Amino acid sequence: MSDIEKRDYHEGSDDDHAPPTYTGLKGFYYRPVTQVVMLAFICFMCPGLFNALTGLGGGGQVDETTQANANSALYSTFAVSAFFSGTIHNKIGSRLTLQLGTIGYSIYIGSFLSLNIHPGAKAFVIAAGAILGVCAGLLWTAQGSLMLAYPTEGQKGRFIGIFWAIFNLGGVMGAAVSLGQNFHSTSGNVKNSTYIVFLILTCVGFCIPMFMADPKKMVRTDGTRVVVPRHPSWKTELWGLWICLRDDPWVILLFPMFFASNWFYTWQFNDYNGALFDIRGRALNNVVYWSSQIFGSLGIGFLLDSKHLTRRSRAFAGWGVLFVMVFAVNGWSYAYQRNYTRATVSPANGYVPIDIHDSDYPARVWLMIFCGLLDSMWQTAAYWLMGAVSNDPAKLAYLTGFYKALQSAGAAGIWRADGVGLPFMNIFVSTWVLCAAGLICALPMLYIRVKNHTDLADESIARMDASGNVQPVEKLIHN
């Protein structure tokens, strides 16, 4: 067990007292896995349904330009918000950060309902995307901090896998609702009722954080406390952003991997699913895409927690799986992409979208399944690598903030490129190159920084006092 898991190193801690023990229903409620499941259901109701809507291509609309521009605005504000959201999270706490983060999803989905009713409401959709970006930065930073702080070092892969599976059930359910309601539709956009169902469910997600446990009362399965950030000033929190990178510079090698982690959505959703298929085919593709994510996240999660391998060996095994998947999936995608352009699949030029009953459909839906597997494996591995360098919620909040900021900056750029009509092939090639580059850059970080256990010497944020000074390891151990 690492030093950081043995005690709370923050000033003013009460680690002289034994951690509380809970029994019965209360014991079940305070179990780390229970809280992570509740966290997953927040994301099931909010980002999960957002993913279902995005996966339809064009947000379920015939004209994909409005959604592409809304996503560009969304990820632009997301990038800025996420960079500072670790600081906000550590100051106001996880539950309030989560609740503020859910608000934007209802506004965004409501904007598409407005667009269905009033076709001139395109500006509202783009503005809603910008608002959602601010909120999403808060939600995902709090989510990442709690998901990586509650498990022990040997449980992180499983906890991430469980979270990702439940979260993606939101995408599955949303896509299934859309498929059921639009199965016999001959129009190119989804019905109002689809947006209304999504809107109600996001409002349910807004309420869940009210019922979550206070992190300071949480105890891991090995009896150790969860360290709660206790930095009393905004100045100290902002200083912590710099300390995080200054004392752990190798994490910068993960930044290309972070940057690529949402880049591929644009080609998958708009330039493949949205471009080639009718609304029924898009909806079914959406169902299988998010369903496959459940298996991908659980599979790589269990690999990354394998008791038969050391943590360093697991890191390299996970990297190897991702490398094979990136080249297999993108090689397969290239076989299709080389045969069409924006012009050849334009309805104005007589293109007839692929339907689920067409002979071309079965092979192409399998590509969507493998795209979903790759996405979930990529995201799960990225979170696991962050969890492999720290157990401290404050540092993890910073790292997940960096992750989401870079992820969103990349997504903003590529969604805008799609919105202005960059050729499909250009977008596809950039996707393949970025994924490969992200893995290559991450490899030295795995070799140098990932250890079999995280030690107190690696936890500079946990050693910060109220004034922002990092205390020496020897001083804390002897106090």
Image (cartoon, grey):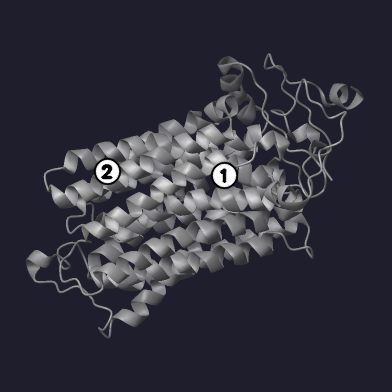
Image coordinates of residue 181 in percent, x first then y, are 27, 68
Q: Judge left or right: residue 395 versus residue 115.
A: right
Which picture quadrant has residue 240?
Answer: top right
Q: Is residue 3 above or below residue 284?
A: above
Image coordinates of residue 404 in percent, x first then y, are 48, 41
**Amino acid type at image mark 2:** Ala
- As helix, strand or loop, the secondary structure at mark 2 comes to helix
Nearest to the eye among marks 2 and 1: give it: 2
Is residue 21 at all visible to an observer of this figure? yes
Out of 237 and 198, give the one closest to the viewer: 198
The residue most toward the right is 478
Which residue is label 2 attached to? 70
Q: Residue at x 61, y 30 (%)?
A: 245
Q: Residue at x 59, y 28 (%)?
A: 90
Image coordinates of residue 391 in percent, x first then y, are 71, 40
Q: Is residue 405 above or below residue 234?
A: below
Image coordinates of residue 15 in percent, x first then y, are 84, 30
Which residue is label 1 attached to? 254
In which quadrant will I find the C terminus? Answer: top right
Is residue 443 at all visible to an observer of this figure? no
Q: Residues within 10 Å of mark 2 (few under 14, many from 20)?
A: many
Q: Judge left or right: residue 279 versus residue 151.
A: left
Q: Earlier in the sequence, mark 2 or mark 1?
A: 2
Q: Residue at x 77, y 62 (%)?
A: 309
